[in-house]
Image (spheres, rainbow, N blue to C red):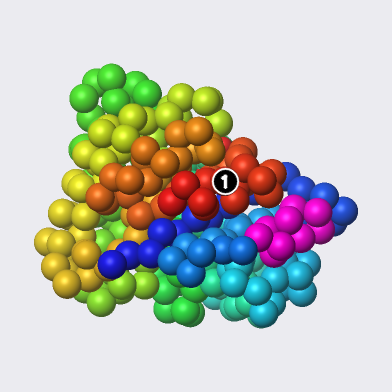
């Protein structure tokens, strides 16, 4: 049985003052035991999350990690630095990184390996653009993206990963994939995991992301292969994020 996992992706939002209000709102909530929640925040706020959330049931993490261990990589943040701040998760290969920062499948695969090797759970983002969906290429695109990650991984590595299916056309647009559309892709991804490791495939969390809100979360989260959400806009408000966790 996979517990539902709800992860907030703050993207480039927040301030020390606003974060206190949001984190206190999350901490005050009585979370059901079968829900896991976490926030992935801008790197400067990891120390704040560590001090505010240590000892709570809420996990935290970052939104990207370097593919390198250390050295002359100006602006990059290593996985050991994320560990210093208690990160449990790191988002890898978000479409905004792929589109605006030129991350390709090979780079994403390297980052996933770096995170896994250092005990931080990568949340590996996969998803097609609107043009790709309309051209009937959804399955091809997400399988290619996952294949790059799996090709660089050992069979047991799968147990350390979380996947997030995030159709690019649904991110921040208010357009959500229907539960059936999302379920179809999630089942496909799980079948692809099973080819590599049948035992692990049933245990891996596959999150849905893309305009998940309190009013559409329940029907998405009821689908058999949707194990939680990666939530952008709605995670910036404690009441909305918790309402999604409640819907799970
Ligand atoms: P959204 O973002 O919920 O604002 O659509 C999701 C994401 O990009 O992770």
Q: Quadrant of residue 202?
A: bottom left
Q: Quadrant of residue 87?
A: bottom right
First to last magenta residue range: 20-29
Characterize the local packing of mark 1: few (<14), some (14-19) or many (20 or more) Cα atoms within 10 angstroms. Answer: some
Is 26 part of what is drawn in magenta?
A: yes
The residue lying toward the viewer, choosing from 86 and 227, is 227
Residue for point 53% across, 38% down: 214
Q: Quadrant of the N terminus?
A: bottom left
Residue for point 59% across, 51% down: 242
Q: Tell me the element at label 1.
A: helix
Residue 246: % across, % down: 51, 51
Residue 196: % across, % down: 16, 66
Residue for point 52% across, 52% down: 245
**From what the image shows, is residue 229 above or below residue 46?**
above
Q: Which residue is mark 1?
A: 243
Residue for point 57% across, 46% down: 243
């Amino acid at each position: 049985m996979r517990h539902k996992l709800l992860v907030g992706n703050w993207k480039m939002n927040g301030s020390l003052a606003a974060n206190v209000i949001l984190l206190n709102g999350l901490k005050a909530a009585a979370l059901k035991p079968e829900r896991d929640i976490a926030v992935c925040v801008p790197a400067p706020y990891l120390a704040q999350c560590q001090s505010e959330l240590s000892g709570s049931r809420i996990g935290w993490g970052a939104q990207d990690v370097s593919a390198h261990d250390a050295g002359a990589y100006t602006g990059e943040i290593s996985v050991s630095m994320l560990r210093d701040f208690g990160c449990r998760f790191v988002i890898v290969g978000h479409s905004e990184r792929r589109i605006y920062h030129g991350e390709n499948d090979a780079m994403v695969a390297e980052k996933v390996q770096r995170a896994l090797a250092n005990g931080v759970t990568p949340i590996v983002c996969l998803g097609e653009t609107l043009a790709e969906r309309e051209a009937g290429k959804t399955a091809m695109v997400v399988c290619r993206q996952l294949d790059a990650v799996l090709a660089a991984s050992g069979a047991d590595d799968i147990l350390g990963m979380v996947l997030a299916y995030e159709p690019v056309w649904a991110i921040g647009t208010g357009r959500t994939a229907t539960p059936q559309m999302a379920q179809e892709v999630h089942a496909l991804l799980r079948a692809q995991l099973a080819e590599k490791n049948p035992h692990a495939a049933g245990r891996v969390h596959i999150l849905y992301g893309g305009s998940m809100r309190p009013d559409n979360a329940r029907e998405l989260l009821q689908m058999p292969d949707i194990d939680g959400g990666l939530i952008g806009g709605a995670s910036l408000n404690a009441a909305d994020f918790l309402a999604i966790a409640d819907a799970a």
